[in-house]
Amino acid sequence: MGATVGGGGVSLWTNLVTDDFGTVGGGFGNQAGDNWGITYDKSYATVGGGRNNMASGYESTVGGGAANTASGAEATVGGGGSNSARGQYSTVPGGLYNTAWGSYSFAAGRRAEANHDGSFVWADSTDANFTSNAANEFAVRAGGGVRLVTGGAGAT
């Protein structure tokens, strides 16, 4: 009931909405809903487009890209490739191979892993995992250095 598939998909790569009020805008091989209809009968999940993306968490969103998953409740993956937002209210804006598995976590860049609740992990382009170590941690891997510019009293 209330499900929408806007277009896209060919033969075996069709788009699918498995729960009420889910939406897939286009692309191919995308799914909104949890496959079984057990966890949520009304998921309100959305996949905007791209390919092989899945939004299975309650009110979760995948904007596009390829092979991304948003399985946490109200989790979001903006795009990129092979990213996963599994924690409740977690976010991966894009990039490649990032995971936001803690609740309220954020992972961005390449192979950033925000595995703890409230962690914010940003990783540069280095092809190696960079993982949070604790809840509510701010972690940055910046092989080229870090620069903070302030217009006042400075940073504390």
Image (cartoon, helix red, strand yellow):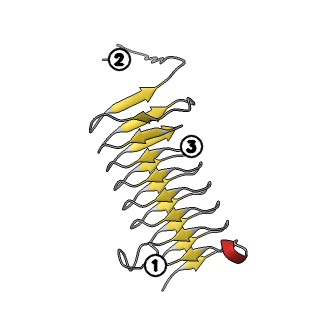
The residue that label 2 is drawn on is 155
Q: What residue sits right under mark 1 in the picture?
A: 19
SS category of the residue bearing label 3: loop
When asked about the image quadrant of residue 42, the answer is bottom left
**Residue lying farthest left?**
135
Q: CA distance from mark 1 to mark 3?
A: 28 Å
Q: Is residue 80 left or right of residue 101?
A: right
Q: Which residue type carries mark 3?
A: Leu
How far apart, in angstroms, are the residues tagged by discs 2 and 1? 48 Å
Q: Quadrant of residue 105?
A: top left
Which callout, 2 or 1, points at the residue further toward the start of the chain?
1
Q: Residues within 10 Å of mark 1 (few under 14, many from 20)?
A: many
Q: Which residue is nearer to you in this view: 104 or 31?
A: 31
For badge 2, the amino acid type reads Ala
Residue 22 at x, y percent in the picture: 49, 74
Q: Which residue is depicted at the point 72% across and 77% down?
A: 11
Q: Is residue 35 above or below residue 64?
A: below
Q: Secondary structure at mark 2?
A: loop
Residue under pointer 3: 96
Q: Is residue 49 left or right of residue 1?
A: right
Mark identifier at residue 53:
none
- Residue at image location 47% in from the left, 75% down from the top: 35
Horizontally, residue 101 falls left or right of residue 46, namely left
> Of marks 1 and 3, which one's residue comes earlier in the chain?
1
- Which circle's residue, 2 or 3, is located before the other in the chain? 3
